[in-house]
């Protein structure tokens, strides 16, 4: 009898382990899909660089405000959320992030803009130590310094007279880390779709107000309207895939695959805009990807 119980326990253990592995694989696939969507969104933002920045940001939010509420209603989840102050704060921070990110895409080499954005996981370590009281190891500090060296090679202080877009991108990466810290806290209170919904409405409302204030709305032709809507759908797809990835697998496992945005962005930049990164940018991007991998290894350990 005891042997039968042990055998059943072993079988149950094998089944649970297999399910966990299958979920992890699905999570990785979803994160790769998110990286592709983010890269495609960046390409479309660059294609629309002649449009007012706030108009691009507004259209980025349109699919979220139209589709996510329907999903929430179908799942019978409240739209309003529980931790409203933090939800709104996260939305405000993300609005600053998207301004910095879209601006750098429109004025910089696509690969450089995407690479600078991927510094945010390293800033998360510092902000988590300050606001969440998480311990920072010597290895993580060394990895952070390595990533900053990579960023310096991309920004090229002293090599270029116009480094302001890169600095804005760097500020955007810091605020991105702040947004992730807020999301990490919000997971204790609200459903991921509620968090995405607040993001869409906050960004959409703020960008619409600023667009009205600026008074520079540009009426898109059929092609540009299609690209604007497609950009919004790509952004929504990225958010949903990202959310699903974090639901299916541990953050420390899937977050590494976000660095694929740099590779996808480089390929798409060459294909659509004939942008070939210089050696400094290639070496800098390599250092940032390596630092991301090392950070992943430290978390696994």
Image (spheres, rainbow, N blue to C red):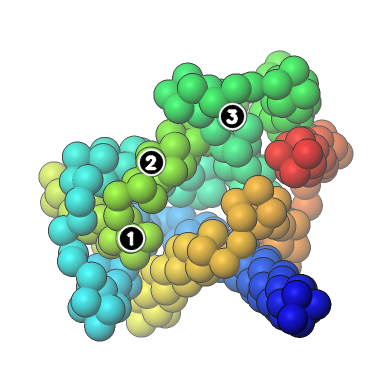
Q: CA distance from mark 1 to mark 2?
A: 12 Å
Q: Which residue is rendered at x = 55% and y = 33% of the image?
A: 124
The answer to which of 228 and 20 lies nearer the viewer is: 20
Q: CA distance from mark 2 to mark 3?
A: 15 Å
x and y, in percent, of residue 145 in the image: 73, 21
Circle 2 packing at 10 Å, graded few (<14), some (14-19), many (20+), is some
Q: Is residue 183 visible?
A: yes
| Circles 2 and 3: CB atoms closer than 8 Å | no
Q: Which residue is rendered at x = 30% and y = 50% of the image?
A: 189
Q: Which residue does the numbered mark 1 point to in the structure image? A: 191
x and y, in percent, of residue 8 in the image: 72, 80
Q: Is residue 29 visible?
A: no
The answer to which of 15 and 138 lies nearer the viewer is: 15
Considering the numbered disc 2 on the image, is that residue within a helix, a strand or a loop? Answer: helix
| Image quadrant where residue 70 sits | bottom left
Give the label, 2 or 3, closer to the camera.
2
Nearer-N-terminus badge (1/2): 2
Question: Is 163 on the left-hand or right-hand side of 153?
Answer: left
Q: In the rendering, which numbered label is found on residue 125?
A: 3
Nearer-N-terminus badge (2/3): 3
Q: Which residue is rendered at x = 77% and y = 23% of the image?
A: 139
Q: Is residue 50 above or below residue 140?
A: below
Considering the numbered disc 3 on the image, is that residue within a helix, a strand or a loop? Answer: helix
The answer to which of 114 and 290 lies nearer the viewer is: 290
Q: Which residue does the numbered mark 2 point to in the structure image? A: 185
Nearer-N-terminus badge (3/1): 3
Question: Is 173 on the left-hand or right-hand side of 260?
Answer: left
| Image quadrant where residue 9 sits | bottom right
| Circles 1 and 2: CB atoms closer than 8 Å | no
């Amino acid at each position: 009898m005891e042997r039968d119980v042990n055998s059943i326990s072993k079988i149950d253990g094998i089944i649970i382990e297999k399910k966990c592995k299958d979920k992890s694989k699905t999570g990785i696939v979803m994160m790769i899909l998110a990286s592709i969507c983010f890269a495609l969104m960046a390409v479309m933002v660059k294609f629309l660089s002649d449009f007012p920045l706030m108009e691009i940001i507004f259209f980025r939010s349109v699919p979220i405000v139209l589709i996510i509420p329907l999903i929430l209603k179908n799942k019978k989840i409240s739209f309003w959320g529980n931790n409203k102050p933090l939800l709104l704060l996260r939305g405000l921070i993300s609005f600053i992030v998207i301004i910095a990110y879209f601006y750098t895409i429109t004025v910089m080499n696509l690969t450089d803009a995407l690479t600078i954005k991927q510094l945010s996981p390293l800033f998360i370590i510092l902000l988590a130590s300050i606001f969440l009281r998480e311990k920072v190891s010597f290895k993580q500090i060394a990895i952070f310094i390595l990533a900053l060296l990579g960023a310096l090679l991309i920004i090229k202080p002293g090599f270029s007279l116009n480094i302001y877009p890169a600095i804005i991108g760097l500020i955007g990466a810091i605020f991105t880390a702040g947004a992730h810290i807020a999301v990490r806290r919000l997971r204790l209170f609200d459903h991921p779709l509620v968090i995405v919904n607040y993001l869409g409405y906050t960004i959409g409302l703020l960008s619409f107000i600023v667009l009205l204030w600026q008074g520079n709305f540009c009426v898109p032709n059929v092609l540009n309207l299609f690209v604007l809507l497609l950009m919004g759908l790509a952004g929504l797809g990225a958010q949903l895939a990202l959310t699903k990835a974090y639901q299916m697998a541990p953050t420390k496992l899937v977050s590494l695959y976000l660095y694929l945005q740099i590779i996808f962005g480089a390929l798409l930049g060459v294909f659509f805009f004939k942008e070939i990164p210089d050696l400094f940018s290639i070496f800098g991007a390599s250092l940032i990807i390596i630092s991301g991998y090392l950070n992943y290894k430290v978390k696994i350990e």
